Image (spheres, rainbow, N blue to C red):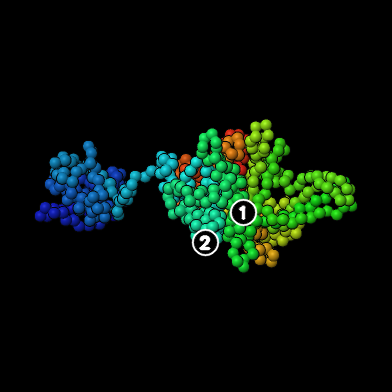
């Protein structure tokens, strides 16, 4: 053996000396061996600790000696003998140990992991309230009686940081003669409350000024006596108009709404019956794109195209009568935040209601609107679009590489063929420098690529615009707020979303968002908010 520790007893204390190159026959009266495993003694390759025959000490003293030899503190030692674990006050001589009997010590050097202050709980075992607290889920808005249309819209608008900055800079105060100014001030305060609160916030003050500034939102139902449900799109449009009017600064030509949420459209009317007649061209500002829905529309882009290309009847000066004109609209300026409205409601005269079209219309999480732009804008955006494409290709490759490595790690396979093929391409890929067009560089709040990502949706469930229920779905930004849900049974998703059902807030995945396309009695996308992808 390479080394044996020999024990003797002196004044009821253990003493020991280390001897080297001892043969088992030299053990003398050391007849009992203590090892971490019985086979270690037979191997002759490990240090062996011997117990002196007839030792009368107690187990706690013996543990102290083992600590000096092994570094395992007494409180972390477990001495096992046939029949069970030795207690600290056990007298070893009473155990009736036989010759060559092996004991086992279990223990670790260093401090043991401490038990958590609170028991570990998994997400799937928590209530919705406990999940909200653990994940730092933002606060919702209390429903004050058919105010879900307002709550859902405000949660989506709150996702625009530039709007929050503009509101923080507005200092008109309450009690203005113009109730719209008090409305904007109360909106500022409400957003601050939502950021600071961990529970549902009642929007009493905001609602009061809203009904003062816009009496139609104060309509009451003569049968129930309560306030009527309102159309979320109408409220969205009204708020953008109010914000644009009130937040305008002296000496500043553009408000936050004009800069970041308004685009420009050029529309051309051409008479099909009079080719010699000069086309009529008009330039106008827009704050939203409409998705027209009929039997032929299955995708968002198809519905928008229907709204931008249509045939209308109007008076022709050259023909001296009404004639059909082909109207074609194209975008010449894209805002950083693009609002898209699904035209799901139509007036049903027989029932005097705004009936709902429940047809499924699929929408993308990433939306390229370049096909709706003028050729001039497309040419200006070309370098930025190419640069964005290179960035996204690189990011896609990195995600694929990470997924492959994770898959290999989980399977235990050593076949890294796919990974080895991907790594050289990733290492050599680099985005070529590009120069943003001067017009786009100078245009603060524009989208220089024409590519958007979805960050918010207002949905509706029900059969009419003035009934049913509205909710908001807002994308959680990476690194903002609490941690993303993780653990056993948690689905994979590229983005997590906050689902705002008034003051009840939970988290859902990309897959859940894509299910809001309609086609049944579940929540259906009504107003979508897209944001320009960052370069």
Quadrant location of the C terminus? bottom right
Residue extending furthest toward the top: 350
Residue at mark 1: 241
Q: Is residue 78 left or right of residue 222?
A: left
Residue at image point 75% right, 59% down: 376
Inspect this view and state whether residue 495 appears. no
Numbered tag placed on residue 172 in the rendering: 2
Residue at image point 18% right, 53% down: 7
Name the foreground residue: 330 vs 77. 330
Inspect this view and state whether residue 183 appears. yes
Q: Is residue 279 left or right of residue 499?
A: right
Q: Give how far across and how far down residue 328 sits, in percent.
A: 77, 50
Q: Earlier in the sequence, mark 1 or mark 2?
A: 2
Element under disc 1: helix
Name the foreground residue: 145 vs 258. 145
Above or below for 466 versus 406: above
Q: Give how far across and how far down residue 356 sits, in percent.
A: 63, 36
Q: Give how far across and how far down residue 105 sits, in percent.
A: 26, 46
Q: Which numbered mark, 1 or 2, is in the foreground of this view?
A: 2
Q: Residues within 10 Å of mark 2 (few under 14, many from 20)?
A: few
- Count of numbered marks: 2
Residue at image point 55% right, 37% down: 221
Q: CA distance from mark 1 to mark 2?
A: 18 Å
Above or below for 41 versus 432: above
Name the foreground residue: 504 vs 405. 504
Above or below for 300 versus 159: above
Element under disc 2: loop
Name the foreground residue: 330 vs 241. 241
Residue at image point 83% right, 53% down: 279
Residue extending furthest toward the bottom: 251
Q: Are marks 1 and 2 in contact (CB under 8 Å)?
A: no
Residue extending furthest toward the front: 177
């Amino acid at each position: 053996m390479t080394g044996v520790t020999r024990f003797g007893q002196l004044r009821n204390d253990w003493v020991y000396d280390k001897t080297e190159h001892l043969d088992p026959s030299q053990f003398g009266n050391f007849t009992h061996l203590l090892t971490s495993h019985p086979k270690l003694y037979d191997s002759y390759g490990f240090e062996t600790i011997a117990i002196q025959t007839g030792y009368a000490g107690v187990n706690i003293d013996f543990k102290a000696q083992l600590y000096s030899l092994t570094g395992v503190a007494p409180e972390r030692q477990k001495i096992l003998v046939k029949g069970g674990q030795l207690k600290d006050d056990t007298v070893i001589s009473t155990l009736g140990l036989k010759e060559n009997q092996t004991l086992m010590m279990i223990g670790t050097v260093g401090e043991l992991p401490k038990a958590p202050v609170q028991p570990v709980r998994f997400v799937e075992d928590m209530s919705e309230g406990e999940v909200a607290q653990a994940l730092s889920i933002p606060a919702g808005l209390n429903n004050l009686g058919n105010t879900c249309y307002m709550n859902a819209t405000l949660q989506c608008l709150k996702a625009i940081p530039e709007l929050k900055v503009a509101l923080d800079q507005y200092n008109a105060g309450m009690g203005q003669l113009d109730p719209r100014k008090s409305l904007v001030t109360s909106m500022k305060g409400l957003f601050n409350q939502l950021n600071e609160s961990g529970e549902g916030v009642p929007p009493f003050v905001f609602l009061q000024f809203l009904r003062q500034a816009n009496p139609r939102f104060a309509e009451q139902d003569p049968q129930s006596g309560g306030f009527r449900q309102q159309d979320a799109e109408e409220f969205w449009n009204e708020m953008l108009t109010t914000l644009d009017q009130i937040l305008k600064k002296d000496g500043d030509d553009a408000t936050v709404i004009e800069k970041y949420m308004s685009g420009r459209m050029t529309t051309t009317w051409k008479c099909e019956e009079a080719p010699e007649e000069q086309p009529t061209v008009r330039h106008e500002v827009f704050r939203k794109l409409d998705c027209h829905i009929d039997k032929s529309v299955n995708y968002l882009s198809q519905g928008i195209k229907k709204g931008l290309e249509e045939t209308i009847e109007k008076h022709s000066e050259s023909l001296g009568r009404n004639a059909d004109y082909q109207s074609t609209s194209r975008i010449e300026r894209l805002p950083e935040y693009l609002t898209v409205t699904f035209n799901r409601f139509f007036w049903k005269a027989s029932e005097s209601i705004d009936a709902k079209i429940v047809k499924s219309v699929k929408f993308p999480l990433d939306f390229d609107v370049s096909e709706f732009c003028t050729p001039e804008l497309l040419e200006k955006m070309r370098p930025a679009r190419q640069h964005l494409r290179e960035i996204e290709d690189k990011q896609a490759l990195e995600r694929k590489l990470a997924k492959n490595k994770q898959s290999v790690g989980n399977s235990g396979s050593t076949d890294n063929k796919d990974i080895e093929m991907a790594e050289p391409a990733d290492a050599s890929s680099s985005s070529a420098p590009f120069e943003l067009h001067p017009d786009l560089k100078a245009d603060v709040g524009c989208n220089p690529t024409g590519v958007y990502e979805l960050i918010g949706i207002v949905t509706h469930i029900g059969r009419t615009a003035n009934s049913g229920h509205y909710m908001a779905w807002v994308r959680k930004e990476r690194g903002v707020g609490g941690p993303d849900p993780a653990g056993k049974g948690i689905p994979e998703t590229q983005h997590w979303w906050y689902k705002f059902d008034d003051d009840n807030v939970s988290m859902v995945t990309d897959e859940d968002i894509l299910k809001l396309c309609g086609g049944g009695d579940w929540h259906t996308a009504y107003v979508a908010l897209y944001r320009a992808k960052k370069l």
